[in-house]
Image (spheres, rainbow, N blue to C red):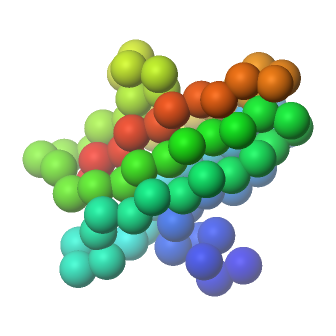
Amino acid sequence: AATGYLLGIRADYSGLIVDPQLPEKELPVTVSRTFRNCRYEIVIRKGNGKRLRVNGIEQLFGTPIQPKENTTINVECEI
């Protein structure tokens, strides 16, 4: 549960939420997670402010990333 909080990756009814709380010294981090038969490839790295991209498209932090069955979703997160 603690790693879920620090990584900020948690399941929601609508999809996977990515909102990391890691300290800078722990970055970069790469995580693979399967949720509802969908593979999420997540990269968390240091950036100039918070940014979240899903398959290259900017998205708001805290917005669930909806799974698409039998696919891989690439998530890039800068904090």
Q: Residue furthest left?
A: 48
User: Which residue is at a point 23% across and 73% down the rendered structure image?
Assistant: 24
Position in image of residue 76 (x %, y %):
39, 39
Q: Is residue 12 visible?
A: no
Q: Is residue 21 visible?
A: yes
User: Which residue is at a point 80% across and 43% down the rendered structure image?
Assistant: 35
The vertical placement of 41 against 22, above or below, is above
Q: Is residue 3 left or right of residue 75?
A: right
The image quarter in which residue 62 lies: top right
**In the foreground, 7 or 61:** 7
User: Which residue is at a point 17% across and 50% down the rendered structure image?
Assistant: 47
Position in image of residue 60 (x %, y %):
44, 30
The image quarter in which residue 20 lies: bottom left
Position in image of residue 11 (x %, y %):
76, 50
Q: Is residue 11 left or right of residue 30?
A: right
The vertical placement of 77 against 56, above or below, is below
The vertical placement of 30 against 53, above or below, is below
Q: Is residue 71 left or right of residue 19?
A: right
Q: Residue furthest top?
A: 57
